[in-house]
Image: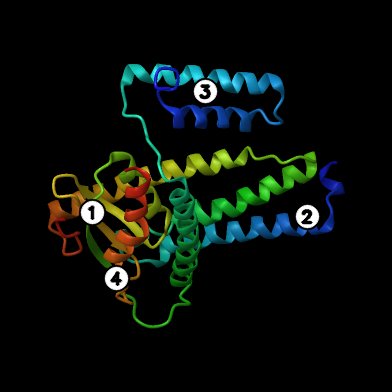
Amino acid sequence: MNAADLPLWGAWLVVGLALAGAGFALTGALGLIVLRSFYERVHAPTLGATLGTTLILCSSMLLLSLIEGRPVLRDLLIGLFLTVTTPVTLVVLARAAAHRDRHAENPESPPVA
Amino acid sequence: MSRILPYPVLSAALAGTWLLLNAPVTPGTGLLALAVGLLVPTVMRALRPDAVRVRALGALMRLVGVVAYDMIRSNLDVARIILGLRRGERKTGYVTVPLDLRDPFALTVLSVMLTATPGTLWVQYDSDTGTLLMHVLDLTEGDDWVRRIKTRYERPLMEIFA
């Protein structure tokens, strides 16, 4: 089956999932503008890295599975590797910011644990 | 067991990855997956990492469910905050959680879980005192974060990696 023969319900589901995922990623990007402090802004990209990614990957797996006529689950690996690597970036960013703020004695700097 | 399979979890993960990348499964790819799962982890012996011992598979499954639920709910909460749909004053702040977890694998999993929920951010863990400092985007409701983390995440993790 090629993409043109996709059943209508399948096409709607694929589009719906992809758009919902993109919506979450866009909201996360907006958060970078809307939120005020650094520590608040670090929360925002997680939206795209978690639910955004999940929905887009579901859409991709559904599309490929329908086209190839068998379950195609390769994309699960993308999700897995994104999930284990994103926290590294965020934790390093947060630690660097905490170190810099404490050094500069900013009022916003995190308390010493 | 430990001579042939020094790192059973790693072996299973490698074989599973191989099969996913080379789907659909044929006898040939199955055999290769077995070979990868058995041979590659022996390379790890040179590095001598501690092997992960996962117990309580039931608790593991339950924890995956809890984290998936929390992830979706906090995604919606944070999206509402960003889009300005959340009414009333919002307060952000830091929470200090005294952890009893010491296992490095369990702590890694906890940091992944906390970072994967958009409302919480792992800032710093002090291995001397065992305290975790995290940033919470929405502290307004005064939800008992310390208790929540300890009962929802830490207790099952201790059960799994005990």
Q: In the rendering, which numbered label is found on residue A97?
A: none
Judged by depth in the image, the label closer to the viewer, 2 or 4, is: 4
Q: In the rendering, which numbered label is found on residue B144?
A: 4
Judged by depth in the image, the label closer to the viewer, 3 or 2, is: 3
Q: Alpha-carbon neighbours of circle 1 within 10 Å: few (<14), some, or many (≥20)?
A: some
Q: Residue at x 79, y 42 (%)?
A: A67
Q: Residue at x 44, y 78 (%)?
A: B86
Which element is circle 4 on?
A: loop
User: Spatial distance from mark 2 to mark 4, Cα to Cα?
Assistant: 43 Å
Q: Mark 1 vs mark 3: same chain?
A: yes
Q: Alpha-carbon neighbours of circle 3 within 10 Å: few (<14), some, or many (≥20)?
A: many
Mark 1 or mark 4, earlier in chain: 1
Mark 1 or mark 3, earlier in chain: 3
Query: Which residue is disc 2 drawn over?
Result: A10
Mark 3 or mark 4, earlier in chain: 3
Q: Mark 2 vs mark 4: same chain?
A: no
Q: Residue at x 37, y 66 (%)?
A: A35
Which element is circle 1 on?
A: loop
Which element is circle 2 on?
A: helix
Q: Mark 1 vs mark 2: same chain?
A: no
Marks 3 and 2 close (CB-CB < 8 Å): no
